[in-house]
Image (cartoon, rainbow, N blue to C red):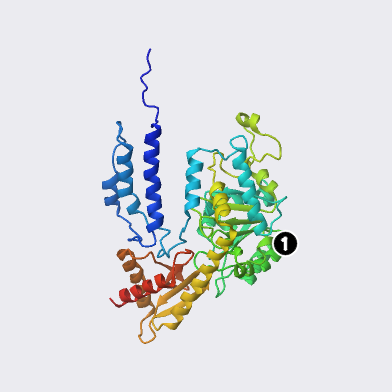
């Protein structure tokens, strides 16, 4: 009987080439024009999105070029340009073209980066790039280890699962974990996922510089020990999302060593600043952590998704995550052949290391160092501009390229509530204008505007023009 299947999901060689060239052309056009392309943000409402995409799955084919044109016309324009020089909100994703094409290679060849047998070369590149990072942060290369994850959230979850296994074993019912009120929300998510109760979590207040309070931490640990509980993990921040603050890592490392507490440093945003001389001083003590989260898709200029977890001892990871299902028994290899599915949560893994590897090889670490130095200097210049103005008040000074400020003219009198409303209005009007992506946060009970300046394409003139527009919106 003749098979009825006639569509093997294939295109001809020429069709693949023509389609591929169009995709590459679109990406190149985006990279070439993103500095000037407006609007920076373009957020549609649900009704608009449903009108574009709410449809039944088609049974019949349509030309690939028509599908591509629809996506380029309707999907990309309704996405914020996270690499635009005037994207200041959240943590921008500057990205780079080499890494984008590297991702295309990894996806195009459909490389499985879970185990050695899937691709020994992929495992080799992951080992090599992890070793670069281990060395950079002062972790032991031979004994240390790590894994690339989808992002900082998954890296934090992996770290806390490892800490729980190493410090608590099977019973964590009396274990206590500590973090500051400025710690990233992904840590709370991870704590919840791992099954800790609310009464096992201590949120330690920060000081006036938004750093974790040493004295309050010591008091909390002492109280928990007196009550027969087990302090087992402290999450420190190396660059908080709100203010870029780095917790006192050396002091915290000393406390953790004395109390036998796992020190995890969430450096998803700021750890990469260690590439700069200024950053290396700020991060002094990070080499004493048990684990570090780094997010290359932030300040190492990689496209989404790539996060990273580093640990002092690679056996901590394999001891936490290794499982031996019968269907994998023939591919375990020897101890030197690392199966990264034994070092983390995912079995099926994308070849994330390739983009980091190819971009570092292409540009060299010196280019990354210069870009980070530029970002730090730019933030300091912006702070100086704000302090010279009669319109603006700096709430949190430039720290790891983040600065918080608010509209508060010296010659006018507003109540705190009025100031909050004005600054919220500035953000809302800026979003409506689509000229820049600038949003608020809350610091010391005040609504403030927050700028994150990690894009090496952002100039001081970009920021000045944005501030001028903010002043116009404030006066409306």
Q: Position of residue 115 (x, y in %)?
A: 61, 38
SS for callout 1? helix
Q: Position of residue 378 (x, y in %)?
A: 49, 71
Residue ID at (37%, 71%): 466
Could you tell me if residue 172 is visible in this image? no
Residue ID at (48%, 47%): 101
Could you tell me if residue 245 is visible in this image? yes
Pick the residue in front: 15 or 303: 15
Q: Position of residue 337 (x, y in %)?
A: 68, 39
- Dot 1, crowdedness within 10 Å: few (<14), some or many (≥20)? few
Q: Which residue position is annotated with label 1?
A: 257
Q: Position of residue 111 (x, y in %)?
A: 53, 38
Question: Height in image: 355 above or below 275?
Answer: above
Give the position of the N terminus as an image quadrant.
top left
Question: Height in image: 197 above or below 429?
Answer: above
Question: Height in image: 121 above or below 225?
Answer: above
Residue ID at (68%, 50%): 166
Answer with left or right where residue 112 lies relative to residue 420: right
């Amino acid at each position: 009987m003749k098979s009825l299947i006639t569509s093997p999901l294939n295109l001809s060689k020429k069709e693949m080439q023509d389609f591929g060239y169009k995709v590459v052309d679109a990406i190149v056009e985006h990279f070439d024009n993103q500095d000037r392309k407006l609007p920076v943000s373009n957020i549609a409402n649900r009704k608009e999105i449903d009108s574009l995409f709410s449809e039944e799955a088609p049974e019949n084919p349509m030309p690939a070029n028509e599908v591509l044109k629809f996506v380029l016309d309707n999907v990309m324009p309704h996405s914020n340009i996270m690499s635009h020089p005037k994207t200041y909100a959240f943590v921008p994703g500057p990205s780079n073209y080499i890494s984008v094409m590297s991702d295309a290679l990894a996806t195009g060849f459909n490389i499985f980066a879970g185990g050695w047998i899937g691709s020994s070369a992929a495992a080799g590149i992951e080992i090599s790039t992890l070793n670069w990072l281990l060395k950079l942060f002062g972790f032991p290369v031979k004994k240390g280890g790590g894994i690339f994850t989808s992002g900082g959230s998954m890296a934090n979850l992996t770290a806390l699962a490892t800490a729980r296994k190493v410090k608590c074993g099977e019973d964590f019912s009396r274990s206590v974990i500590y973090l500051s009120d400025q710690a990233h929300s992904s840590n709370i998510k991870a704590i919840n996922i791992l099954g800790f109760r609310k009464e096992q979590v201590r949120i330690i207040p920060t000081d006036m510089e938004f750093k974790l309070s040493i004295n309050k931490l010591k008091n909390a640990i002492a109280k928990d020990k007196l009550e027969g509980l087990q302090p087992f993990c402290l999450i420190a921040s190396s660059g908080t999302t709100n203010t870029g603050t780095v917790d006192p890592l050396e002091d915290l490392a000393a406390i953790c060593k004395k109390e036998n507490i796992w020190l995890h440093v969430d450096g998803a945003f700021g750890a990469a600043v260690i590439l700069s001389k200024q950053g290396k001083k700020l991060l002094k003590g990070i080499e004493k952590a048990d684990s570090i989260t780094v997010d290359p898709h932030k300040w190492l200029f990689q496209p989404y998704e790539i996060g990273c977890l580093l640990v002092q001892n690679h056996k901590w990871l394999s001891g936490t995550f290794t499982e031996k299902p019968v269907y994998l028994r023939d591919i375990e290899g020897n101890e030197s052949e690392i199966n990264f599915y034994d070092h983390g949560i995912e079995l099926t893994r994308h070849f994330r290391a390739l983009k980091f590897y190819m971009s570092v090889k292409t540009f060299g670490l010196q280019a990354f160092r210069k870009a980070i130095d530029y970002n730090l200097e730019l933030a300091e210049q912006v702070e100086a501009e704000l302090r010279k103005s009669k319109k603006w008040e700096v709430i949190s000074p430039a720290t790891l390229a983040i600065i918080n400020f608010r509209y508060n003219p010296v010659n006018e009198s507003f109540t705190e509530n009025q100031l909050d409303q004005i600054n919220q209005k500035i953000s809302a009007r800026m979003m409506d204008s689509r000229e820049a992506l600038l949003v608020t946060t809350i610091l010391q009970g005040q609504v403030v505007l927050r700028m994150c300046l990690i894009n090496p394409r952002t100039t001081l003139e970009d920021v000045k023009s944005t501030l001028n527009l903010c002043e116009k919106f404030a006066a409306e």
